[in-house]
Image (cartoon, rainbow, N blue to C red):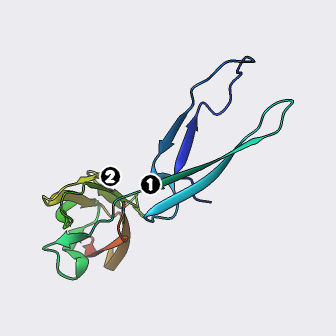
Amino acid sequence: KEKAFKISPMKDVIPSQTEHEVSVIFNPFESAVQKEKYQEEIKMNIENGDPEKFTFVGQVSLCNVKFFNLPNDTIDFEMVHTGVPTTKTFSLKNETNRVVTAYQIQNPLPEILQFKEVAGYLTDKAKSVEVIITHKEPNPEFYAEVPILIRGGPKLLLKLKANVVQPE
C-alpha cells in the first residue's frame, strides 16, 4: 500500500478537554507508486470512544526530467577489470520552468553499483551524478537497468553495460 503521509506521534495520551498538536508529513517518495496527487484516509483510534477518520490530500508539481547528453539513456563502461572500481558520470535535467523537483535512484545491485548521490533535488541546471561499478566476477555482457523516481514526473530508466574482464 502506498504511504505518502507520516503522522507524528503515532501514539499519545491526550487529557480530557485539552488540545494536542500532531504533525502530518507529506513525503511522496515513501509511496511505492509515484504520481501527481495522493489521497490517504487515516483512522485515529480512541480508547473508550469512536474512531475518528481523517483524509489527507497532497499534490506535487508536474515536471519533465530527462537524461542530459546521454544517448539511448545508456552508460557504456566498456572494458572494466574485476575488482577495480570504474566511475562514469551522467546528468539529469529538469526541463520544467520554475519547478524544483527531486529524484531518487533505486539501485537494484548495491553490491556491484554505487551512486555518489542516490537522492537529491533538480532545478533548471543539469545535475551530475557519479556511478561506480565494481564487479568481482568476469562478465562480458554485464547489463543493468536502474530505475530513477522523479517527483511529479515519470520514472526514468538508466541502462548500464560493461565488459567485465579478469586482468592477466
Amino acid at the residue labelled 2 = Ala
| In front of the other: 165 or 147 | 147
The type of residue carrying mark 1 is Phe
Figure quadrant of residue 107:
bottom left
Quadrant of res 132: bottom left
Q: Quadrant of residue 84?
A: bottom left
> What residue is shown at x 36% (from left), y 74% (from top)?
144
Callout 2 environment at 10 Å: few (<14), some (14 to 19), or many (20+)?
some
Q: Are marks 2 and 1 in contact (CB under 8 Å)?
A: yes
Q: Secondary structure at mark 1?
A: helix
Residue 62 has which mark?
none
Viewport quadrant of the N terminus:
bottom right
**Secondary element type, mark 2:** strand
Q: Which residue is drawn at the image coordinates 50% and 64% (left, top)?
A: 33
Q: How far apart are the two marked residues, 2 and 1, measured between alpha carbons?
A: 10 Å
Q: Is residue 29 left or right of residue 64?
A: right
Question: For mark 1, does the 10 Å Cα neighbourhood hold few (<14), some (14 to 19), or many (20 or more) residues?
Answer: some
Residue 105, image x and y in percent?
A: 35, 59
- Does 94 appear above or below 26? below
- Tell me the number on the disc at residue 29: 1
Residue 22 placement (x, y as % from top left): 57, 30
Residue 167 is at least partly visible in this image: no
The answer to whether any part of residue 31 appears in the image is yes
- Count of numbered labels shown in the rendering: 2
**Mark 2 or 1, which is nearer the eye?**
1
Q: Quadrant of the C terminus?
A: bottom left
Rendering coords of residue 109 (x, y %): 41, 63
Q: Residue at x 60, y 54 (%)?
A: 40
Residue where numbered disc 2 is placed: 119
